[in-house]
Image: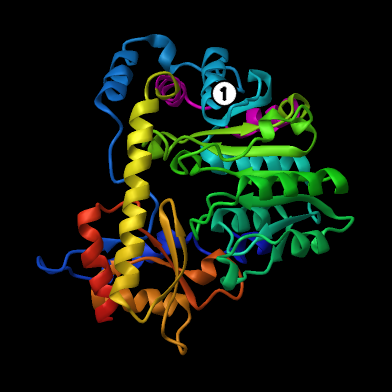
């Protein structure tokens, strides 16, 4: 059977590729695998959320469809969560619950763009965004990576990339893969640029719960729906990555059009995910705040220990779940460098080139799914390699 040529050109899912290398490895008891590959919280959901879902299994409605956009009472609870954490919020009609942030991204792209349109992305870019744009026939226009600026997007550089085919500027904050947070003032500037050029600013804010402050104030702007779309995820927030709790936030008009795609793609987010999301938004603010602090402390320890170790690797940027490092092997690309770490040190991470062109000198380390006590061992393996 023939596969479409443009699909053949898309890279293999990076985490799947890297984990496939493990089939050739054996791990001694004194040197177990250190997994810095996938951004998964090292902790489980709280017991009370799990018990809540267990109770829901006795309700026949748990197993039925919901409205395409999600249950109204769940969307109302999500909006109240936004009021507390952003000091401004969308209305329930401006929100569609999705199968993770990735599906929210697909809804946004299929609603805004046609094949041949362009979306500006900042390098290094989240690999699922690159892969999705390629699959949809939308051209990703890459704003170059500046290691001296920790990969922060440059307003003037992005402005110069806008042309008649540009539909949106797509930014990720905190960044996956660098962890860098775009300051609120800078986000406002990008929103103003989108307004001035009559395009959309799309923010993927999957890791917004791990900043420790309100990420921005765009929801306080009365005209935010005209040029702003948010891709949201609660999988990391409430440690529900397997339930795929995402959302698309946009104008009511955009949401109404996305429901045409939603209905033909997935119909709705499963009720189990919606019930978990509702419970989390209602009851888990203190639990989330505690884990957010833990993750910031884990990042601080990783950064301090990494810099003190003086490895041959260079820390370019870090934050939330991630560190973006330059590897020391000038004769190796990122895949080869990552394979070397697997073979010699039983450590897995992601190659830089999976996050965009020209990034073969870099690696993404995800320390979010290891405990703080494991950080010294992980850094020691980088020293030894």
Camera-side residue of 126 and 117: 126
Residue appearing at x 35%, y 51% in the figure: 368
Measuring from the top left, give residue 84's x and y in whole percent. 52, 24
Residue appearing at x 47%, y 25% in the figure: 270
Camera-side residue of 384 and 141: 384
Measuring from the top left, give residue 293's x and y in whole percent. 35, 42
Q: Which quadrant of the structure image shows residue 53?
A: top left
Measuring from the top left, give residue 95's x and y in whole percent. 63, 26
Total label count? 1
Most distant residue in the bottom direction: 331
Residue appearing at x 67%, y 47% in the figure: 185
Is residue 114 at least partly visible in the picture? no
In this rendering, would 286 be left or right of 102? Answer: left
Is residue 34 at least partly visible in the picture? yes
- Asked if residue 276 lies in the magenta stretch, the reply is yes
- Residue range corresponding to the magenta coloring: 256-279
Magenta part, dominant SS: helix
Callout 1: 10 Å neighbours few (<14), some, many (20+)? some
Q: Which residue is mark 1?
A: 83
In this rendering, would 356 be left or right of 210? Answer: right
Q: Is residue 5 depicted above or below 294 in this figure?
A: below
The image quadrant where one finds the C terminus is: bottom left
Camera-side residue of 89 and 161: 89
The image quadrant where one finds the N terminus is: bottom right
Element under label 1? helix
- Asked if residue 23 lies in the magenta stretch, the reply is no
């Amino acid at each position: 059977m023939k596969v479409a040529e443009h699909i053949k050109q898309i890279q293999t899912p990076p985490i799947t590729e890297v984990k496939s290398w493990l089939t050739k490895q054996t791990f001694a008891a004194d040197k177990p695998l250190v997994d810095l590959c996938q951004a998964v919280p090292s902790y489980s959901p709280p017991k009370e959320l799990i018990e809540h879902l267990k109770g829901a299994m006795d309700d026949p409605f748990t197993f039925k469809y919901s409205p395409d956009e999600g249950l109204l009472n769940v969307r109302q609870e999500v909006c109240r969560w936004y009021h507390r954490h952003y000091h401004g919020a969308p209305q329930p009609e401006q929100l569609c619950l999705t199968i993770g942030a990735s599906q929210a991204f697909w809804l946004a792209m299929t609603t805004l763009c046609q094949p041949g349109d362009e979306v500006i992305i900042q390098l290094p870019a989240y690999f699922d965004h690159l892969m999705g744009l390629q699959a949809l026939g939308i051209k990703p226009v890459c704003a170059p990576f500046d290691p001296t600026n920790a990969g922060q997007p440059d307003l003037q550089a992005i402005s110069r990339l806008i042309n008649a085919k540009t539909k949106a500027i797509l930014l990720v904050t905190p960044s996956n893969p660098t962890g860098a947070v775009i300051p609120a003032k800078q986000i406002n500037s990008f929103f103003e640029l989108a307004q001035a050029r009559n395009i959309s600013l799309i923010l993927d804010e999957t890791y917004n719960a791990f900043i420790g402050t309100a990420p921005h104030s765009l929801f306080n702007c009365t005209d935010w729906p005209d040029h702003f779309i948010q891709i949201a995820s609660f999988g990391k927030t409430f440690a529900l990555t397997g339930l795929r709790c995402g959302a698309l936030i946009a104008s009511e008009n955009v949401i109404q059009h996305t429901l045409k795609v939603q209905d033909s793609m997935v119909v709705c987010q499963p009720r189990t995910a919606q019930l978990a999301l509702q419970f989390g938004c209602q009851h888990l603010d203190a639990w989330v705040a505690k884990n957010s602090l833990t993750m910031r402390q884990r990042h601080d320890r990783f950064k301090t220990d990494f810099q003190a170790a003086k490895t041959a690797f260079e820390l370019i940027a870090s934050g939330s779940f991630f560190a973006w490092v330059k590897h020391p092997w000038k004769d190796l690309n990122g895949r080869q460098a990552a394979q070397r770490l697997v073979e010699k040190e039983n450590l897995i991470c992601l190659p830089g080139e999976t996050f965009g062109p020209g990034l073969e000198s870099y690696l993404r380390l995800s320390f979010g799914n290891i405990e703080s006590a494991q950080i010294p061992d992980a850094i020691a393996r980088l020293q030894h390699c």
